[in-house]
Amino acid sequence: MTEHRVQRRLAAILAADVVGYSALMERAEEATYAEFERLKCEVIELGLSRHNGRLIKTTGDGALAEFASPSAAVRCASSVWLAYIWASERSNSAWAASLFSPARRSDPNARLGWFVIVGTIPIAVLGAVFQHSIETSLRDLRITGTVLILFGLVLAVADRKAE
């Protein structure tokens, strides 16, 4: 019998999803689809190429990408989010207005700006600070699995609180 050797390599997988995509599609299907395709070309693919990522699969409102290291995936996610926010005039103006008017903080575009600040920037800073730990000691699959489960629970709680 011939021995079949499997070549293995470590990779970081980035999963992205558009929040509220179904609701946006119900309101304005063609405009939502066109905007998502534009963002995919102008923002997502550019971020992947800058951080040596490879697009594995796209769905209607999401994508899976592969990176050689977790820190590259975090840097890509941060840059895509920030590029999207800066490119989105509605989000910028709504977020700026919500700084001075608490009543405007319920606007979805303003909330998006706050979510980016509260969520993305601290994650990017922690990724940069703990880059060595992420790339070396945290490669244990049990730790990775536990962190993903905990992160999923946090997202589920945040999603329910937002409704």
Image (cartoon, rainbow, N blue to C red):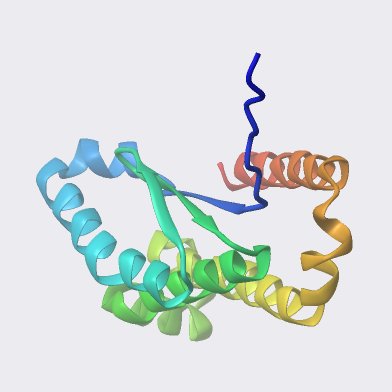
* 105 to the left or right of 134: left
Measuring 43% from the left and 70% from the top, which residue is drawn there? 80
Q: Nearer the viewer, residue 115 or 101?
A: 115
Q: Position of residue 33 (x, y in %)?
A: 18, 48
Picture quadrant where residue 138 is located: bottom right
Q: Nearer the viewer, residue 163 or 112?
A: 112
Q: Nearer the viewer, residue 114 or 30?
A: 30
Q: Is residue 122 above or below residue 25?
A: below
Quadrant of image for the C terminus: top right
Count of marks overlaid on the render: 0
* 140 to the left or right of 14: right
Q: Position of residue 35 (x, y in %)?
A: 19, 58
Q: Position of residue 156 (x, y in %)?
A: 66, 39
Measuring 72% from the left and 80% from the top, which residue is drawn there? 128
Picture quadrant where residue 39 is located: bottom left
Measuring 23% from the left and 64% from the top, which residue is drawn there? 41
Q: Is residue 138 above or below residue 88?
A: above
The residue at the far left in this view is 30
Measuring 30% from the left and 78% from the top, which residue is drawn there? 87
* 49 to the left or right of 98: left
Picture quadrant where residue 107 is located: bottom left
The residue at the far front in this view is 1
* 163 to the left or right of 22: right
Quadrant of image for the N terminus: top right
Q: Nearer the viewer, residue 128 or 30?
A: 128
